[in-house]
Image (cartoon, helix red, strand yellow):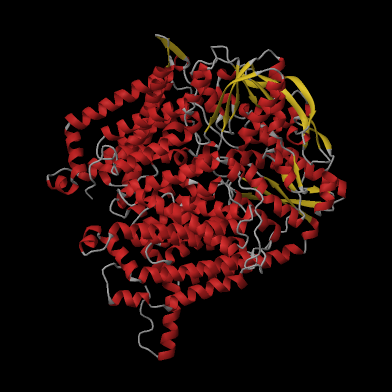
Amino acid sequence: MFIRQKTLVQGAVAGLLLLGATALAARAEETVKIGLIVPMTGGQASTGKQLENAVKLYMKEHGDTVAGKKIEVILKDDAAVPDNTKRLAQELIVNDKVNIIAGFGVTPAALAAAPLATQAKIPEVVMVAGTSIITERSPYIVRVSFTLPQSAAIMGDWAAKNGIKRVATLTSDYAPGHDALKFFKEHFTAGGGQIVEEVKTPLANPDFAPFLQRMKDAKPDAIFIFVPAGQGGNLMKQYAERGLDKTGIKVIGTGDVMDDDLMNGMGDAILGAVTAHNYSAAHPSEKNKAFVAAYEKAYNQRPGYVAVFGYDGMHLIYEALKKTGGKADGDSLIAAMKGMAWESPRGPISIDPETRDIVQNIYMRKVEKKDGQLWNIEFETFKDVKDPGKTKK
Amino acid sequence: MRADHGVGEAVLRRARWGHGETAFWLIAVAAIFVFPDRYLILTEMAWLGLFALSLDLILGYAGIVSLGHAAFFGVGAYAAGLLAVHGIVKEPVLALVVAGLAAMVLGFATSFLVIRGSELSQLMVTLGIALLLRELANKFSDITGGFDGLQGIVIDPVLGLFAFDLFGKVGFIYCLAVLAVLFLLARLIVYSPFGLSLRAIRNNPLRAAAIGIPVNRRLIAIYTLSAFYAGIAGALFTQTTALASLDVFSFERSADLLLVLVIGGAGYLYGGLIGAVVFRVLQDMFSSWTPQFWQFWIGLVLVLIVLIGRERMYRGVQWLPRLVLRRIAAARGHAAAPDRSAS
Amino acid sequence: MTALPTILFDGIAYGMLLFVLSCGLAVTLGLMNFVNLAHGAFAMIGGYVCAVLVNRSGVPFFVALPIAFVVSAAVGIVMEQTLYKRLYHRNPLDQVLFTIGLVFMAVTAVDYVMGSSQVFIHLPEMLQGQFQVFGIGVGRYRLMIIVICGLLTLGIQMTLANTRFGSRLRAAVDNPRAASGLGINVPQVFALTFAFGSGLAGLGGALGAEILGLDPYFPLKFMIYFLIVVTVGGSQTITGPFLASLLLGIADVAGKYYVPKLGAFVIYTLMIVILIWRPNGLFGRVAQR
């Protein structure tokens, strides 16, 4: 009985939806729909929110019409669970008839949607997930974010050249952590450095004390860290608590640990930490200053790198549509996106026409204090870095 | 209606196939034609329903609580995934059975740890086992694909005939069929003497032992069977989504499962299925309405369910259909007092 | 070889923190047989109260701590009187459903008000860093945790053992019916205890923000740890969860230090082994109800 009721209601709802859908279909040619699938709940929620903010900001600045088409963004929450991602992507493609799927907070989510992009011939714009292999999983995947090897490899080179001889590593025990470790290690040891201690921390890890103690006991010149978004703050706080900042052991790592939107909360302990990354809110360009100001004005918060990815993702979609003259089929869009180059808040970036992956500058930055706030100040630039995870093959 | 004391005749009466049940399954089949654009969520309901059914077998019939049922779901999922990736068993139905058996082995092995102890320690031991498996799956990433999930899963057509499509139609029918078969099997089991003995154990283990029921052996048997069911649910999940990643073992999955079963009500087999439908419909409704804050409304619904009381709510839900039925009966038989209050 | 004392010290601090966070849960479970999965939400409230006071209003940290306690306790007593009270006699699954619902609501509400990013509490200078005692590194913050939590534990133990309220409470735990027959106002004892437990959780949340991190998902993330402590320790006494917290804290820290490869497995394995050996918890008596 209970079921029958439920089904009746469902039927009515579905019927209404169908009606709505046919009404919309008449206007469908005028709209380009983007299905934005991001984690809005769960441990990754802040990623999703930054992305959504940035996408909204971009559309506010650039209008919601491009090449005669109205842009419509449909936001879905996958809580970073891949089976949700897949179902939502499938429903967006089949029912909502979206022209583009975008977002993807974690690698498994991006991978789960890949076969659908191929099957439906719809561009999948990856805005966050950073494992190398993603773009190889479908000819319709374009990535505007980053790959971990990009920054980890550069960090390894830089450390070896700048007087750091012995490094202890602390990385999260999951695929992105392994990626970061592997590329750092390869480049660092190739440059003559030595890894004196290697620790992998569990993903769900409330207390870093024992791992940091190991780091301290190994007496390295520096520790290389990679932990998932959200744990960086804890790690750095405990680094200071353990007095590692006083022992002269430097912190080096990939830049996601020093996320701009969190670093002010981490306190002065992070002063002097050197990281390699593609974006710093302190990037000295007009474009970036305008972006940071607009974002701070709209959301009362400093934008992190994820926000830039969302902003650039929308830019890529807008520009591709301009280039195709509003043609929104997957093949035209992908063709238009390949090789596209533009000035992003992070600096000049482009889409590699062969791998559809991001090519960008990697900056070496050091945490410094300016006007009472902490910033990642860039001091060295590695130009047009491709994903080392792929170029090796 | 769900009293436990009625034995003998009452059990026989309950074991008889009712009209409500016919209606339930007719509606389930009708869903194939009514919601052609919602196959994916229907598929989720089907495997979630089966998963909840497996928990119902131990919770509702044997009184064993679990907060780590995802362990078996996950083993089933990875087993199905690995079988497909390495081409060991290509045909999905066969792979399903193998995956179920894999979960069953784990169920049997861990049953010895679980069946002793208080409810709280049951909850925590099962939870611990699931979390350990998750860590193991992460550690052995060369086998499981680690955090990225198992890659390259391609599922062959069911029985070599029906290929899985983008719309999810085949997937749904397949899941529904498996669910129906396993449901009927479970129904046979719980109304068999074996099933009745389980209920005796749940109600009073001491007394059950006193009348000669081998308590531990029965509990191990049902726990193992439940693991088999959960494994199949996991395998269905992997086969219909071509995914298997660490979150199949997650605490959230086990906890959601418990919610599903408690929403639907334990101990009458349909609870899990109904709970799965309600939970997914609510989740889908709220999360497309407000992708950021849907959890709040789910939470509110859960709180209200408890505060209002499930029994009272079902009565409320059944009020309209009952009224209609009564009207029809009255009109047909010119019966007296058609206007009697329907509450 | 200076590592061992430091590891022990860290482990004890971590364990103490676990204890303060979960002791309220043990009490509600032992006293009212109520499965309060929303316990972590009270801890989160305390954490956020402290963070807002210290970071935005510039209230000194040591003043903010008691306020966090009071606010959480106040929220606790309001919830107890309006909602929890009605559910003491319901079956445990309803209680689980209800409290999980509360957790979902609390998580989203905090997310809505405070944002989903992590929050850090600005600590006073004197609590930062480490100092050396006989060559052993001692973290100032952790030392403070040990001192505060140690005093609290002593206080609780004294209250339970030596005061009138303590004996009423113990009577109510042992046998609520007999206790109310003796004229003890059991519902009142329940309410006060619940408030105190929530307050402790709030204090724990404020203290733990520095080490465990604080974001809206705190209650869900740490629910498992609270449950582990309570299950391993048993819920009939305070000493049980206390010793269990210390054991788990030290084992977790030491395990991760000495065998980092198996770090993730230590706490779960330990729990399973203990529960197989003593199904009612290390210090639990056989359940009466």
Quarter of the C terminus of chain A within the rendering: top right
Query: Which residue is rendered at x = 70% and y = 30% of the image?
Result: A292
Residue shown at 17%/29% (left/top)? C162
Question: Left of B275 or right of it: where is C187?
Answer: left
Judging depth in this view, the residue of A390 and C132 nearest the camera is A390
Q: Quadrant of the N terminus of chain A?
A: bottom left
The residue lying at 37 percent from left, 53 percent from top is B65
Q: Can residue C75 be seen in this view?
A: no
Q: Which residue lies furthest to the left in this view?
A: C182
Q: Position of residue C79 (x, y in %)?
A: 35, 44
Q: Which residue lies furthest to the top in this view?
A: C134
Q: Where is residue B21 in the image (x, y as percent from the top left)?
A: 45, 74
- Pinpoint residue A108: horizontal percent, then vertical percent: 63, 45
Q: In this view, does B159 lie above or below A254?
A: below
Given residues A79 and C110, the one toward you in this image is: A79
Mark yes or no: residue B163 visible. yes
* Residue B78 in picture, x, y percent from top left: 56, 51
How many tags in the picture? 0
